[in-house]
Image (tube, grey):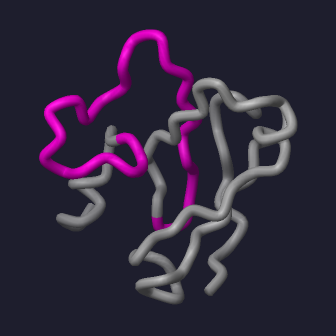
Amino acid sequence: MDRDEELLRGRIYGQDHDDPRQGPQPGRDYAELVGGPLDGLLLDITGWTKGEIDTGVALPTELGHFGAGGRAMYDPRPGDKRRRWDWSGDTP
């Protein structure tokens, strides 16, 4: 695991690296991002509707194939939509 990967493990997507609350918080719902540039991060899906969860997301990231301005696409895993979301590619 390289240094960038090490810094990402166990963190919530969208939180700053120096946020004192980097890990999961009680009472929140998280999906683990699996594969791709955001592998291992947790996505806070608290309050998301079934429709929003079923749709998946395109998350802004500098770590993907398209660099700054690109997005990593993640879709909920069939049968495990609230716990794991799989990477399906990058988009500009």
Q: Quadrant for residue 82, please give it.
A: top right
Residue 15 location in percent, x, y?
31, 46
Q: Which quarter of the rendered picture does the N terminus lie within? A: bottom left
Compared across the picture, whether 12 is left or right of 31 comes to left
Q: Which quarter of the rendered picture does the C terminus lie within? A: bottom right
Is the magenta region chiefly helix, strand or loop?
loop
Q: Residue at x 46, y 40 (%)?
A: 42
Q: Residue at x 59, y 69 (%)?
A: 72
Compared across the picture, whether 87 is left or right of 7 comes to right
Residue 69 location in percent, x, y?
49, 83
Residue 88 location in percent, x, y?
72, 66
* Residue 28 in the image: above or below residue 60: above
Residue 26 location in percent, x, y?
40, 11
Q: Which of 39/21 is in front?
A: 21
Q: Which residues are magenta?
A: 12-37
Q: Magenta includes 47?
A: no
Q: Magenta includes 26?
A: yes
Given the current orientation, which residue lies at the most extreme top position?
27
Q: Residue at x 83, y 30 (%)?
A: 50
